[in-house]
Amino acid sequence: MLFEGQTIQVKSIEDGIYDLVFDRQGDSVNKLDQRTLAELRTAVDTLNGVDGLRGVIFSSAKDSFIVGADITEFMGFFSTDDDELVKGLLDIHGLFNQIEDLSVPTVAAINGLALGGGFELCLATDYRVLGDKAKVGLPEVKLGIYPGWGGTVRLPRLIGVDNANEWICGGSEKRASAALVDGAVDAVVETSRVNEAALDLLKGCIAGKFDYQARRAEKINPIKLNQVEQMMAFESAKGVIGAKAGPHYPAPMAVLKTIQKHANLPRDKAIEVEAKGFVKVAKTEVCAALVGLFMKDQYIKKVSKGFESKAEPVKQAAVLGAGIMGGGVAYQSASKGTPILMKDINEAALQLGLDEATKLLNKQVTRGRMDTTKMAQVLNSIRPTLNYGDFSNVDLVVEAVVENPNVKKAVLAEVEGHLPEGAVLTSNTSTISITDLATALKKPENFCGMHFFNPVHLMPLVEVIRGEKTSEEAIARTVAYAKAMGKTPIVVNDCPGFLVNRILFPYFGGFSALISDGADFQQVDRVMERFGWPMGPAYLLDVVGIDTAHHADAVMAEGFPDRMQHEGENAVDCMFKQERFGQKNNKGFYRYELDRKGKPKKLVDDEVPALLAAISSEAREFSDEEIIERMMIPLCIETVRCLEDGIVASPAEADMGLVYGIGFPPFRGGALHYLDQIGLANFCEMAQKYEALGPLYQPTEKMKQMAAAGDKYFSEAKG
């Protein structure tokens, strides 16, 4: 053993050939934290001092290669002053340059994920051998930054400007086949053969079969495009990538400008440009918000893992109700490996559920993400049934029948009698009290809520709702099942609307009040979409379904009469009364026609203003600022109430619930991060302007106390 540390070992393979192995002790993955970088520096210095050194392989003893930098460490680094941050980046560049400048050939043996800084390290080697199931990529733009350890310099020189722009600005992970086609790796082999193939390639370099110095020169010299070719490559990319990134995410455009700026420079000068540009994006509010979301997501995974460790896995699931929602649940469960029974009371409903699952599977096949054999296996894992004959082997049931408490109670009581001891029963309800539904059951301790969001296959969040008598065992198994389905579960306590809908309806209340006061709903939609929401409130109501929203609005008004009840007819009531249910019947605040792909296309409906005039005061102009304030204040205050009432356990879970559940603008970091960003004192002062609008606009006493003390919901380190 030439070197042995806590994260890296350097072993002799044979005479003059060494293997630098990443193997972070006490962890399941390798990360580039400060300790690893320090050991890497020592290991490289040690290799440089070896007499007769002929070649070096960089490999991993884990299932992955290196998943990236340890962002929890580097956020503190981002908060240092600009000069210090640049100096720190150039210090790491110096280390990677040392690897690239070794006097012998180098090969990265990439057996699993190599992302971010992990892949930038691979780019510093002369050649890269990739396992056929591995993925590589530079996803930094998803954190509001861009590659800062040479990725913007080496990748475009290696695979060309157009490919590098797509890789870096898109931030996606690349499968082995795509990485090979683009030239980011030199060979793809079975994962079990990665180290063997890397050694063969290294020996080929040593024998002179491969000119590793020429490969190295490509990355060290300027990009091989003339001025006209450069202009065409970068200017065309700016239009496409600028449109895709939008105005709220500066990192993709920043990286384009950075690559363009250093295109004509040699490596050592180019990395200085990269480092200085990196500092600018690392200091943005968007970066703070997106890194904060990443860290909150890591926290939620840790919480979920705690529940999973206490749970027996779900080997056989069942869903009651085979409509679009039931079919979506069945598809998601079966496609992720958990077989599921799908029960309904008639054949037509079962066929509808199977058709939904088949449609979703066909899309996967069309996109090349699944072959027909796998599709058949998934469909065979969904067993339709009209009776409870096979329910004696079910570990967990998802009830997904009509949103009616009496119907749900009857179905839940019926299925309970057919389940084995210890099976968990859950209800996919968006508004009905779990504690109330449990009154129909003999064993309420085995019952909880499992609220999926529509469409099931796209929406990442599942609310796991704890009723008054729900056991921790039931919660744990439900969380484990949600995770097995590929979802992000957040455990919340029972109340009208639970977490997400309880917060969403004050937002809709702000919208209805604006319409009542004479606002143009289309202007409100445009303003809130520019603010960052994927769709404005009127459009969102159409997508949710006006009938669904009308029912939920009544539940919320009954549950929180002090602030969610309203006098007279509001905008949702008006649309419901006119049987304008949104996309369900192609007319709501907007009208809808199917486009060429069969998706509903939103169109202006000239009838709507006259309908809304009956419940509105005289039309008047509202500034964008006033619209934003009147929409966001109720949402933010209700989020705080959910935290203070113990409905959600932490600020991190509250923010992630909104981002994953209703598309809260990620670059704003969640409602509580948004409050921290504004400052609670400023927020309370802003809310005071609208206190006449009622309790929805009145901060809690604790908020006022925190404002006076200058407190925040998150420390700087936690986003």
Image (cartoon, grey):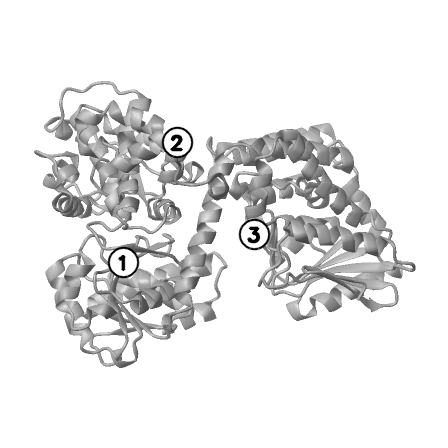
Image quarter of residue 147:
top right
Please say if 330 is above or below 269: below
Amino acid of disc 2: Gly
Please give left or right for residue 670 compared with residue 34 in the image: left
**What is the quadrant of the N terminus in the image?**
bottom right
Give coordinates of residue 226: x percent, y percent: 74, 31
Image quarter of residue 406:
bottom left
Q: Which residue is mark 2?
A: 710
Please give left or right for residue 356 compared with residue 136 in the image: left
Q: Crowding near pointer 3: few (<14 within 10 Å), some, many (20+)?
A: many
Amino acid of disc 1: Ile
The Cα–Cα distance between marks 3 and 2, rounded to whole angstroms, is: 41 Å
Give coordinates of residue 638: x percent, y percent: 26, 40
- Residue that appears at 59% across and 30% down: 280
Q: Which residue is mark 3?
A: 173
Q: Which is more foreground, mark 3 or mark 2?
A: 2
Q: Nearer the viewer, residue 614 or 292?
A: 292
Residue 515 visible in the current orientation? no
For the residue labelled by badge 3, is the local secondary structure a helix, a strand or a loop?
loop
Q: Which is more foreground, mark 1 or mark 2?
A: 2
**Furthest residue in direction left, as rendered:** 568
Amino acid of disc 3: Glu
Image quarter of residue 415:
bottom left
The Cα–Cα distance between marks 1 and 3, rounded to whole angstroms, is: 33 Å
- Specify the label residue 465 is tagged with: 1
Please say if 712 is above or below 215: above
For the residue labelled by badge 2, is the local secondary structure a helix, a strand or a loop?
loop
Q: Nearer the viewer, residue 237 or 699?
A: 699
For the residue labelled by badge 1, is the local secondary structure a helix, a strand or a loop?
strand
Mark sitting earlier along the chain (1/2)? 1
- Specify the label residue 370 is tagged with: none
